[in-house]
Amino acid sequence: MTRRRMNILLHWTFFLMLLAMIKGGTDAIWLRWAFVVVGVVWVGTALVKGIHAKPGPKLTGVLRRSFKLAHAGLYVMISFSVLLNAAALIDWASKEFAFTSLLLVLAAGTLHALFHFWRHNVLFDNALRMISPTFAHKYL
């Protein structure tokens, strides 16, 4: 599996698990452990191979300079959420803190998605094609 495909798979899997956990109130133990495993794989990959994100030539100014830092911030948020959820699973932390961390990651992820939607539709740099599976490219 290529790094790009792995990144796409991790993005969408993490997002769907996040939504399922928020909808279900994080009651499914297997889903919470799967969330922790996917988060560890995603953050671990970023730590070993670096963040797989680039601003692209059409992004300029402050947005270009802050691009990598903003993505690193998302990885930090994901790391804390994964750690809180793992700690809650083994009764070292409160389930409420773990749930709140999911909401914060969802909010940050929504802003992240809106930024890339803006890039795709205003700068026309195909930002959504970079993170979408190949079958979805004809719709973008």
Image (cartoon, grey):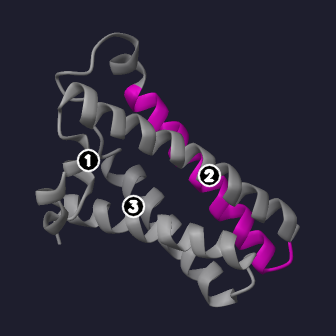
- Residue bounds of the magenta highlight: 67-93
Q: Quick one: label 1, few (<14), some, or many (20+) residues within 10 Å?
A: some
Residue underneath mark 3: 11
Q: Residue at x 75, y 84 (%)?
A: 27
Q: Select label 3 or label 1 by which is in front.
A: 1
Image coords of residue 36 (percent x, y): 59, 72
Q: CA distance from mark 3 to mark 2?
A: 13 Å
Residue 78 visible from this viewpoint: yes
Which circle's residue, 3 or 1, is located before the other in the chain? Answer: 3
- Seen in the picture, residue 105 relative to 10 is either above or below; the reply is above
- Check disc 2 and report the residue beneath it: 105
The total number of labels drawn is 3
Q: Verify CB contact (< 8 Å) between mark 2 and mark 1.
A: no
Q: Indicate which disc residue 128 carries.
A: 1
Q: Are marks 3 and 1 in contact (CB under 8 Å)?
A: no
Q: Residue 65: x percent and y percent?
A: 37, 17
Density class for disc 2 (Cα within 10 Å; few <14, some 14-19, many ≥20) is many
Q: In the visual, does 27 lie left or right of 77?
A: right
Q: Amino acid at mark 1?
A: Leu
Q: Is residue 23 left or right of residue 137?
A: right
Circle 3/circle 2 CB separation < 8 Å? no
